Image (spheres, helix red, strand yellow):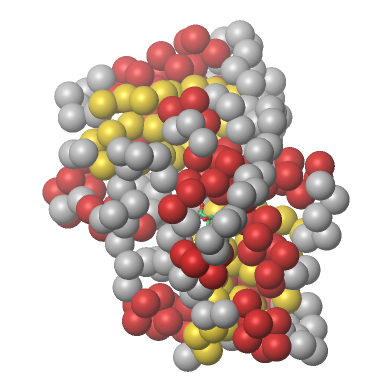
Amino acid sequence: MPRVVESSTELRQKLLRAGQVGLVPTMGYLHEGHATLIRRARAKCDTVVVSVFVNPRQFGANEDLGRYPRDLDRDLRVAGEAGADLLFHPDVDTMYPPGYATTVSVGGVSGPPEGTSRPGHFDGVATVVLKLFNLVQPHRAYFGEKDWQQLAVVRRMVGDLNVPVEVVGVPTVREASGLALSSRNSYLTDEQRGRAVILSRALGAVQEAALSGELDTARLRQAGLDVLGQDPEVDLDYLTVVDGDMRERGRVENDPMTRVLVAARMFGVRLIDNLPLWPEGDPA
Ligand code: PAF
């Protein structure tokens, strides 16, 4: 079992002579996607720290902060089985003590699509991630590609602010059905999860169109929209094809950074997912 550490002083003390440190930042309710990140860190680092902190600053006023799933026993079990050494579990006052007044705001890649739908979200993410980097001082930090734009924001921040951390992006882990793993899937029943697979099917349709040679963004989008239109439960926020700088252009480039991103509400739950149009190594 990993050791639970709640204070920054104890964290620093536990990390003395820790060698190469890997950090897996999470909001808890760990699943196989997180376990994959932890195993990647375990394979490369001497000490693996998993942070579990439901960061209030990245939730909008009408979002699910209050009901976000929490289960520390489950987190300890999953983190332990995957090879974590320490579980950093600060409370809100430890991260944002009275008088706290600083926000990290990353330009450019924090905008559309996700940043427009969730104003302030990436300020909250960048702020907490930089704080975690300063507290843990990891050599490497592991993030899932499922939150593709978040990964772009963290990379931009690390580059712009010369943060001495290697950011490692890890491919999305999916259920056999194709549904991307997410702590928020726990809000759905089995039947609803079955219906939510439509999001990854839509992304697959866009990828297939690209692999067949379609480069026109509007037509690529339409391939995905045709799939999403098959289920009236899909309340679409966006389906967009973007380059590595999160820009939507009229035509796409055959480049591993070109991605199709989707966000939709189904059964009252906001779900996101993405796929590369040309998976690495596929010349199309
Ligand atoms: O991806 C998440 O779980 C969160 O956004 C993160 C990176 C842990 C920051 O709170």
Residue 49 percent location from the top left of the image: 61, 76
Residue 254 seen in this snapshot: yes
Answer left or right for 28 relative to 197: right
Residue 33 percent location from the top left of the image: 46, 61
Q: Tell how many labels.
A: 0
Q: Is residue 40 above or below residue 98?
A: below
Q: Is residue 253 above or below residue 15?
A: above
- Is 219 in front, or is 265? 265
Q: Residue at x 53, y 61 (%)?
A: 98
Q: Residue at x 77, y 59 (%)?
A: 166
Q: Residue at x 37, y 66 (%)?
A: 29
Q: Is residue 47 above or below residue 226?
A: below
Q: Residue furthest front?
A: 99
Of the 4 image quadrants, the one containing the C terminus is: top right
Residue 198 seen in this snapshot: no
Q: Quadrant of residue 109?
A: top right
Q: Quadrant of residue 211?
A: top right
Q: Residue at x 26, y 42 (%)?
A: 269
Residue 26 percent location from the top left of the image: 50, 63
Residue 50 percent location from the top left of the image: 56, 73
Answer left or right for 44 relative to 183: right
- Is 255 in front, or is 135? 135
- Is 36 in front, or is 213? 36
